[in-house]
Image (cartoon, coloured by chain):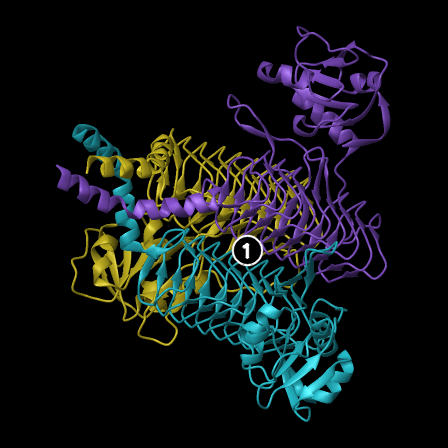
Chain colours: A yellow, B purple, C cyan
């Protein structure tokens, strides 16, 4: 999340009651979860296993629960007992929960020629471009941005919260919600089918690139970046913080795991499961996915096992 | 789509600025996409690869981008530069986009004893029979037809647009929406679970036969024909223009590809993927599906590979 | 379903015009379908194949279509021609269909600090605790119970009817709906994503235990019991009357069959299909599921088939 304007690090330290070490005169320009950090960002880390990753990330300011690390050149530490709670405090300050008074928020901006059907809910600070069609029972939640000539079909949800938790198994409630302060950004000429759910970024944006078409009941996780002119058939599910490059085709019921990349113009056949990154320009099949021609040959080989068994018996 | 009344071919030719060749005195009774054409229909074709298929189809009048084909006996050609745009022009003329003024359209007809819950949206020209139950947050879109004693549970969408595009990869936006002018027709005693999406036909009707029961989060594609007394468990997905005959059972998360036929009383076990037509009266499993008993035996054979390996080592 | 107060068996017998045999002075405390019966319950059975199971179940009073069985000590029979119709009559008497006059029923009880977004529907006799967030276009149907600090995201349906039918293939409509008289009970600190569907119990309760977190588009069937601190990723589907113990993790698109048990802290990897009970504390993969390490080794063995083929050729 970008802050509305750069914020003095000392002010942040006061807000979360942190001890400030290192370059304390800086201004923070935003806050992000580790998978999508940028220069000027605050980030948090509460486990020694991830200290190094966070300190070496693009983030400039690290909310951390130790003093015993070397501060990288030009960066600063904000030392607190509970970095997760500090992160939540900052996010809630800049993105406070705003109950809705009406189905279409008075702070939403809706472009000319855009049709909003009955029983649609549009949250605070939403922007919708020109000549869009928003069908009945759609929910577009706070801060989401929608371009021009976008179609969103009935029952679809844009901007649901990330499925993202702080986990500690030594307390009664194991999973604590990390508030989602990112947005969903949908570019021009995108079409989204009925009954889809597009999660907002937990800290960054979930992005759907220009001209991409999405069929019914597709789920897209938080902070996922989808390229231009992609085609996703019904019931596809894409986990969080994944990157799908331009022109990718995912057929029905494909599942894609988190934080991976599918390269340009790749095609993934129906019901496949993608556990790790795929090179562009090829066709894949299977769960876990393989090159489709290799997978097909494998299915033929499996059919030969009884014959193999016969041959061995004859040899014996 | 049937036209409200037969339309002079010359009038159509004027509308789309086409050159009319062949039997120009005829009347067109409807317009359809190639997979569901009937006599009296207009159809369009814009790629030489499909010229022959369209000319030989049941359609009587072919919107085409060439003069260099033989006109079949009694048929007519409407020659234009861009047959897809011509198709869109005709469809938009007969099915213009009608924004909704209220959640329940004043042109909807709702039978006696039918209960419509709060937050339901019912579009223009929808017909709903007697003694139906329509639960909260359901969307029933324009022109859909629902029989008697039908139950539709919460959040379900009836009549979302087809996932159907005209594709050209040499332009900025690769996929252009083909407007859906078909309907969804649901017969008596059908029950549809919560969170389902039933697409309207792109040009014909999507049909759900009498007494068929559908669990939650089932997706049914455009122009698909479902028989009587079928049973579809949760999260089943069926692609477009497919035919499912009477009494078919699909268990949870089954995926069915497009334009195929599943025969009467076939059973497809959970999570299977159906890539091509299946004979009726049998049980299937796997992705891609096979006869369930063959598939089960295959799983046993796979478990024997380590033993095969041992035996070969001994032979060597 | 518990009755509001114990009901004389003779009164029930009158209601369904049954002949009462055995301990006719008893009071019935509830009615349940066979998979979740308790002492004091009425149950019904209409097929000789299941007579014995019902007579020996925990249920005290059996609605049955025969006189020719031995009545277990202390129990009673209610003999009718059509036990299914008798069951429906009793359920409809105690849980009559109540149309909703407004989106938020005046009989719903909503706790302090709970936020209800626009376009939410809340049915009769629903109870929602304190400090909950109910996002737009959610449907919470009659009699459901929701604890404190619960979050339900947009478009989700709580309390849809069970997918549960009485089947007879010798009539025109094969499947007749068994009315759902159970509830959905959601404990404190549960979070449910967008576009989920949680079915009510057909006769008992569907329960989601404290602190369990559920991602988008998850389906949970009727009478299913989910433990505490479980984690279900997007597009998981769980069939009816299943038991998921505490701390179970189901990754994306997992399917779980009905009436089975998944033991404490089990992990099921993405896209797996669970056909039967799984022991706790282990990780599973595949459709059908196996221990994940065995399944992974199997995938490696399959890749060796061509080499096996080569070796046999050399031996020959």
Please provide percent x and percent y for residue B111.
84, 55
Seen in the image, is C53 located left or right of residue C296?
right
- Check disc 1 and report the residue beneath it: A142
Q: Secondary structure at mark 1?
A: loop
B182 or B16, nearer to the observer: B182
Asked if one can make out residue A59 in the rendered structure from this viewpoint, the answer is: no
Seen in the image, is B46 located left or right of residue B15?
left
In the displayed structure, B47 sits above or below C205; it is: above
C232 or C257, nearer to the observer: C257
In the displayed structure, A231 sits above or below B54; it is: below
Please provide percent x and percent y for residue B188.
76, 52
Count of marks, rendered view: 1
C255 or A222, nearer to the observer: C255
Seen in the image, is B152 located left or right of residue B7?
left
Q: Quadrant of residue C305?
A: top left
C39 or B65, nearer to the observer: C39
In the displayed structure, A162 sits above or below A176; it is: above
Please provide percent x and percent y for residue B187.
75, 49
Please provide percent x and percent y for residue B195.
61, 55
Q: Quadrant of residue C142?
A: bottom right
In the displayed structure, A308 sits above or below C104; it is: above
Q: Chain of mark 1?
A: A
Asked if one can make out residue C92 in the rendered structure from this viewpoint, the answer is: yes
Q: Quadrant of the C terminus of chain C?
A: top left
Q: Callout 1: few (<14), some (14-19), or many (20+) C-alpha neighbours within 10 Å?
A: many
Q: Quadrant of the N terminus of chain C?
A: bottom right
């Amino acid at each position: 999340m970008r802050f509305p304007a750069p914020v003095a690090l000392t002010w942040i330290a006061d807000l979360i009651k942190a001890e400030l070490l290192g370059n304390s005169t800086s201004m923070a320009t935003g806050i992000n979860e580790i998978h999508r950090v940028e220069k000027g960002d605050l980030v948090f880390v509460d486990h020694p296993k991830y200290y190094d990753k966070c300190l070496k990330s693009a983030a400039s300011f690290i909310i951390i629960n130790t003093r015993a690390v070397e501060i990288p050149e030009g960066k600063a530490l904000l030392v607190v007992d509970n970095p997760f709670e500090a992160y939540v405090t900052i996010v809630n300050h800049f993105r406070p929960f705003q109950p809705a008074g009406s189905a279409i928020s008075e702070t939403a901006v809706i472009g000319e020629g855009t049709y909003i059907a009955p029983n649609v809910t549009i949250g605070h600070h939403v922007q919708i471009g020109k000549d869009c069609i928003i069908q009945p029972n759609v929910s577009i939640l706070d801060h989401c941005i929608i371009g021009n000539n976008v179609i969103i079909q009935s029952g679809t949800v844009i901007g649901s919260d990330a499925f993202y938790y702080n986990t500690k198994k030594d307390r009664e409630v194991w999973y604590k919600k990390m508030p989602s302060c990112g947005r969903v950004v949908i570019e021009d000429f995108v079409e989204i089918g009925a009954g889809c759910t597009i999660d907002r970024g937990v800290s960054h944006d979930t992005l759907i690139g220009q001209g991409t078409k999405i069929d019914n009941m597709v789920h897209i996780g938080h902070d996922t970046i989808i390229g231009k002119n992609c085609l996703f058939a019904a019931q596809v599910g894409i986990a969080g913080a994944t990157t799908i490059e331009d022109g990718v085709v995912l057929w029905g019921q494909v599942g894609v795991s988190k934080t991976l990349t599918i390269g340009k113009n790749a095609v993934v056949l129906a019901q496949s499961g993608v556990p790790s990154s795929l090179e562009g320009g090829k066709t894949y099949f299977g769960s876990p996915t393989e090159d489709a021609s290799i997978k097909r040959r494998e299915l033929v080989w499996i059919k030969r096992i009884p014959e193999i068994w016969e041959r061995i018996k004859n040899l014996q």
